[in-house]
Structures are given as structure tokens and as C-alpha cells.
Image (cartoon, helix red, strand yellow):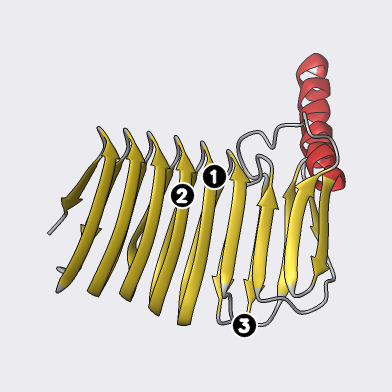
Amino acid sequence: MRRLALVLALSLSCAAACAAEQVRAAAPFTSISVQGPISVTVDAGKAQTILVRGNDRFVSGLTSEVVNGELRLGMRDKNLSAGKGEQRVLVTVPALRAFKAEGAGETLLNNIRGERFDLSYRGAGRLVINGQVKSLKMRAEGVGEVDAKALVANEADVRFQGIGDVKVHAKDRLDTVVQGMGTLTYYGKPRNINNSVQGIGSVDAGD
């Protein structure tokens, strides 16, 4: 019984030591750049906040700064993995105009709205985005997945290179260039479509 109590006490102590949260102050920003295996959730349309959640090593090792209106997230130790579980950066922002990521993290962008949104994604992670914009410009490269099916755009300009999977939603016009072995699936039944495929990749209608 005494040994069991000691094990439970040590487990609770480790859980407290391994879990941490930190609120970060930052100047106003309308775009985000992520470098490294960092998982991020962004909720647009809310007051600006930045919350870093994870173990002590992740929280203390994450860097954040705003340069020319862009929030830049990275890791001090380039060899440090963000790991699995609840290690994540939670961001709320009034409006997000652009997002760029290089790495293998999992990204969720919610309620993206506006005239134009620029998205650049490179790596082996997964990005899911929803909202409504007039114009979407997307650049994707690598073996990851970019799911923009729930981001309804009037016009979309997509350049995709690699062996990953991309989904996009355009109502009026869709321009695509696919290089490599990847698959691009489009939704929204756009009236004007201009596709170019270089390699054995494909561009397919999803509805």
C-alpha cells in the first residue's frame, strides 16, 4: 500500500512538472510564420492572444516574435521534436491574412475571412482550414496534407509540388499547377478551370 501511494505521488508530481502553459505577449499581427515541428491552432475573429501549451521543454524552447506584422514561431533547439499530445500553440487574432509553415506539425486555421488569403505550406504535416474569402493563393510542397475544402473561395490560385494531398474549394475560378505525384481535389464546381499537370499527379473534381 505504501509503495502504491509513493508511485501515485510520483506520477502526479511528474504530470504537474511535465505540463505547462504560458501566455505570450506580442505586438499586433495579421500573418503567421511557423518553422519546425510545431502544432498550431488559430481562431480568427477574436481578440489577440497567444497561449503555449505542453511540457516544460517545449514551452521554454518555443520562440515567438512579431516582425513587420508577422508572428514568427520557431524552436531554439532545431533538433527538438514537438512530440505528441497537448503540445500546441493556441492563437486567437482579429483577422489573419497569411499563413506560412515549414515542418511536420498539425495546423488548424478556423474562421478565416477577408478579401484575400495567402497560404504557404511545406513539409510532412497536416493543415486544415475553414472560412470564406474572395481570393485564395496557395503554395504547397512536400508529402503533407492541406485540406482547404471548408475554406470557400470565389477564386483560387494553387501551386502544388510533391507527393502529398491537397483539397481546395473555389466557386468561380480555379487555376492550378501540379508537379510530381500528388493529388489535388477541388470542390465548389468552379465555372472557369485552368489546370496544368506536370508528372504523374492528378487534378480531380470532388463533387
Q: Residue at x 60, y 57 (%)?
A: 100
Placement of 22 over or under 188, stated as above or below: above
Q: CA distance from mark 3 to mark 1?
A: 25 Å
Disc 1 crowd, CA 10 A, few/some/many (<14, 14-19, 20+): many
Q: Which residue is mark 1?
A: 122
In the displayed structure image, the side of residue 107 where residue 21 appears, left or right = right
Residue 34, x across and y down, in percent: 67, 52
Q: CA distance from mark 2 to mark 1?
A: 6 Å
Disc 3 crowd, CA 10 A, few/some/many (<14, 14-19, 20+): some
In the displayed structure image, the side of residue 164 where residue 109 appears, left or right = right
Q: Secondary structure at mark 1?
A: strand
Which quarter of the rendering shows the C terminus? bottom left
Circles 3 and 2: CB distance less than 8 Å?
A: no
Q: Which residue is mark 3?
A: 94
Quarter residue 24 falls in: bottom right
The numbered dot on residue 140 is 2
Residue 26, x across and y down, in percent: 83, 72
In this view of the protein, which residue sits in the foreground, 180 or 24? 180
The numbered mark, 3 or 1, whose residue comes first in the sequence reads: 3
Circles 2 and 1: CB distance less than 8 Å?
A: yes
Amino acid type at circle 2 is Ala
Q: Residue at x 74, y 54 (%)?
A: 73
Residue 94, x across and y down, in percent: 62, 82
Disc 2 crowd, CA 10 A, few/some/many (<14, 14-19, 20+): many
